Image (cartoon, helix red, strand yellow):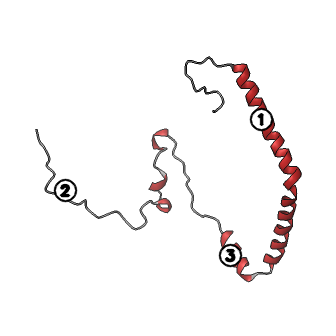
Amino acid sequence: MAFGKSTDSKRIKNAVLEDQLWRTYIASEEKTNQNWKNKWNWILDEYDELHKKLGELSKDSAFLSDVNKNLRETDKRTIKPIPETTNHEYGWIPSLPDFKLEKYGADVDSPAPLPETYHIFKG
């Protein structure tokens, strides 16, 4: 049962009881968080040590230096100038040449004709 929702629609809600249940729920969440820190905080220390060792090993790697160089390249496209009116807010980015949605040109396929069993009624 979710807080604030009763199973019976005719039932009168008790706001004080629901507030007390919510406070108990929050207190148990905070207690669980503290218990996790007491039991498993060493995992975070191990992760920090592992991250430092990995950083030291990756400094000497030629492959990773090339990968990191490619990751550092910035996107040179720009969306400026932004339209001045709200009438042009929607759909203006794809009108810029760098942000075209159709990479390979327009779709030139025509739709298939309807089967003979379909009839278009005019009337």
The percent position of residue 46, horizontal first and vertical second, equals 86, 64
Identify the image quadrant of the N terminus: top right
The percent position of residue 95, horizontal first and vertical second, equals 44, 55
Disc 3 element: helix
Nearer the observer, disc 3 or disc 1?
A: 1
Nearer the observer, disc 3 or disc 2?
A: 2
In the drawing, does residue 89 fall left or right of residue 71?
Answer: left
Q: Which residue is mark 1?
A: 26
Q: Which residue is mark 2?
A: 114
Q: Nearer the viewer, residue 13 or 77?
A: 13
Give the alpha-carbon distance from disc 2 to disc 1, as whole Å.
60 Å
Q: Quadrant of residue 67?
A: bottom right
Dot label at residue 67: 3
Disc 2 element: loop
The percent position of residue 110, horizontal first and vertical second, equals 25, 61
Q: Amino acid at mark 3?
A: Val
